[in-house]
Amino acid sequence: MVITQRGKLGRSGLEVSPISFGGNVFGWTIDENSSFEILDCFRDFQRINYSKKNKKYVF
């Protein structure tokens, strides 16, 4: 399943998908193996986009 629908984020003009994934817990409250397991599940659900500045993290 790939979600292609986008919506505006407030008045910022940014377009976002209806489902978002925050990663602030990685490296703080869960270990590396658990982090990758969660990211793999989310990647399988929906394509992950990162900033073009962080090219080494693009899936």
Image (cartoon, grey):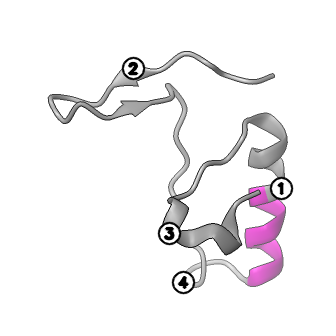
Q: Amino acid at mark 2?
A: Gly
Mark 3 vs 1, N-terminal side: 1
**32 in relation to 43, above or below:** below
Q: Quadrant of the C terminus?
A: bottom right
Circle 3 or circle 4, nearest the eye? 3
Q: Secondary structure at mark 2?
A: strand
* Mark number displayed over residue 53: 3
Marks 3/4 in contact by CB < 8 Å: the verdict is no
Mark 2 vs 3, N-terminal side: 2
Q: Secondary structure at mark 4?
A: loop
Q: Residues within 10 Å of mark 4 (few under 14, many from 20)?
A: few
Q: Amino acid at mark 4?
A: Trp
Dividing the picture into quarters, in which one does residue 57 lie? bottom right
* Mark number displayed over residue 7: 2
Residue 35 drawn at (x, y percent): 73, 70
Marks 1/2 in contact by CB < 8 Å: the verdict is no
Q: Secondary structure at mark 1?
A: helix
Report if residue 9 lies within the magenta region. Answer: no
Q: Main secondary structure of the magenta part?
A: helix
Q: Which residues are magenta?
A: 32-39
Q: Which residue is mark 1?
A: 40
Mark 4 vs 2, N-terminal side: 2
Is residue 37 shown left or right of residue 58? Answer: right
Mark 1 vs 2, N-terminal side: 2
Q: Amino acid at mark 1?
A: Asp
Q: Which residue is mark 4?
A: 28
* Mark number displayed over residue 13: none
